[in-house]
Image (cartoon, helix red, strand yellow):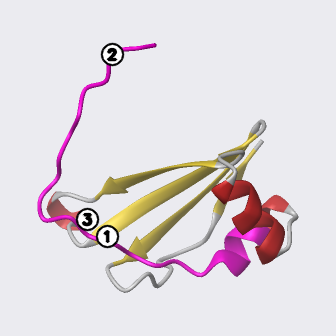
Amino acid sequence: MRDAIPIALQPALEIEIDATPIASAFGLTPEAFLRLLRQRRISQLCERGTGEDAGLYRASFYHGRRRVRVVVDRQGRLQGAIEVRG
């Protein structure tokens, strides 16, 4: 087992993002996407914006060789286009 380094960000924030456009970018139904996410077959990473990007969050989702990335505001509204690689 690897050693873990806990990182606590304050304030803790929970943002809800509509699964439909992300699922579509993967070629999945929202139900299949959420199922794979719960099964940890899709991983995710969220980054907070700083400076001029403060208040924005970049969420990246990984499945196989494909990555789907979105930028959202605190209400979970998409800001700009969905980026798909792979």
Residue 61 painted magenta: no
Which residue is pictured at 17% across the width and 47% down the height? 8
- The reply to whether callout 3 and callout 2 are in contact (CB within 8 Å) is no
Indicate the secondary structure of the residue bearing disc 2: loop
Query: Could you say which quadrant of the image residue 46 lies in?
Result: bottom left
Name the residue that disc number 1 marks: 56
- The structure residue drawn at horizontal position 41% and vertical position 14%, both measured from the top left corner, is 2
Q: Is residue 2 above or below residue 46?
A: above
Write down the region rendered in magenta: 1-23
Q: Earlier in the sequence, mark 3 or mark 2?
A: 2
SS of the residue at dot 1? Answer: strand
Q: Secondary structure at mark 3?
A: helix
Q: Quadrant of residue 29?
A: bottom right
Q: Would you place residue 20 above or below residue 57 in this image?
A: below
CA neighbours of label 2 inside 10 A, class few (<14), some (14 to 19), many (20+): few
Tell whether 12 sits left or right of 16. Answer: left
- Which amino acid, by three-letter code, is at mark 3? Asp
Relative placement, left or right, of 16 versus 34 is left
| Residue hosting label 3 | 53
Q: CA distance from mark 1 to mark 2?
A: 31 Å
Identify the residue under disc 2. Answer: 3
Q: Counting other residues with Cα less than 10 Å from the Cα at mark 3, is it few (<14), some (14-19), or many (20 or more)?
A: few
Task: Answer above or below: position of 82 versus 68.
Answer: below
Q: Nearer the viewer, residue 47 or 43?
A: 43
